[in-house]
Each structure stands twice: as C-alpha cells, then as structure tokens.
Image: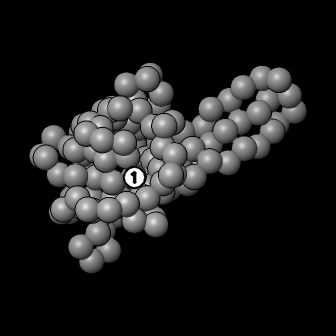
C-alpha cells in the first residue's frame, strides 16, 4: 500500500456533499471540484478488479464553464463522502475510499481518493 501524503497544516474535510455533478462542498462551505476521475481494470485469476481514482481540488470560486481538466463522466462518484478514519472515507453508497493524497501546492489544495471494486467471473 502506498504511503499517504497529508499536509498537517490543513485539516481533512470531514464531509464532502455533492452540490452538482462533480462539485462538492465540505462542512466549512469550501468548494471541491472533481478535476480528474481515472478508471483502470486488472484481473487476478477469475477475479476482475476495477480501480477508480478521483482527484478533488479545493476551489475558492466555481468555474463559469467546464474546463478541459474536468471529468466528462463522474457518475460513479457518491453523492457524499464522510471521513471515517485518518485515511478512509465512506460514500453514501456504502463504498470505502482510501485517501492517497492530501497536499497543497501554491493556492491549490488537492485530495486524492481511490476505491478498488472486485468482481468474480
């Protein structure tokens, strides 16, 4: 498992609630945008795994128009995430998302979460 990069100067959001497709608001009314959603597939014997990684960025203002970095399809994201432990968020759909990164570069704060979904053939 990869090490989690956490910026101790900025607390993690406890709640992220969807206010629009791909746009979330935390408990402090800060806006987070899903700027990238990556999906990959792998197989292990007769088990197929799908990994979904979402990159959220804290924005001080909402973009007026979609930017090229915004995902085209983020229907796989829950309508709300709740911080359960130091490195795990739970989605409203009952899924557990692992915190991969919480960092800041300049004015941009990033939160990266992933989930691995396994299915048997």
Q: Residue furthest left?
A: 28
Q: Which residue is mark 1?
A: 34
Q: Residue at x 44, y 22 (%)?
A: 94
Q: Position of residue 21 (x, y in %)?
A: 36, 42
Q: Residue at x 21, y 43 (%)?
A: 26
For residue 11, side relative to residue 52 (left or right): left
Q: Position of residue 2 (x, y in %)?
A: 55, 54
For residue 72, side relative to residue 16 (left or right): right
Determine the secondary structure under disc 1: strand
Q: Position of residue 91 (x, y in %)?
A: 40, 30
Is residue 17 depicted above or below 106 in this figure? above
Identify the image quadrant of residue 108. Answer: bottom left
Q: How is the image coloured?
A: one colour
Q: Is residue 102 visible?
A: no
Q: Quadrant of the C terminus?
A: top right
Q: Residue at x 72, y 44 (%)?
A: 41
């Amino acid at each position: 498992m990869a090490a989690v990069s956490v910026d101790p100067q900025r607390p993690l959001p406890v709640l992220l609630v969807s206010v629009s497709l791909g746009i979330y608001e935390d408990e402090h009314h800060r806006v987070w945008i899903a700027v990238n959603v990556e999906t990959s597939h792998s197989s292990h014997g007769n088990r197929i795994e799908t990994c979904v990684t979402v990159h959220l960025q804290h924005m001080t203002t909402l973009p007026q128009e979609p930017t090229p970095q915004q995902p085209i399809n983020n229907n796989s994201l829950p309508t709300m995430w709740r911080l359960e432990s130091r490195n795990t968020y739970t989605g409203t759909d009952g899924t557990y998302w692992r915190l991969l990164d919480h960092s800041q570069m300049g004015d941009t704060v990033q939160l990266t979460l992933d989930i691995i979904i396994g299915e048997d053939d």
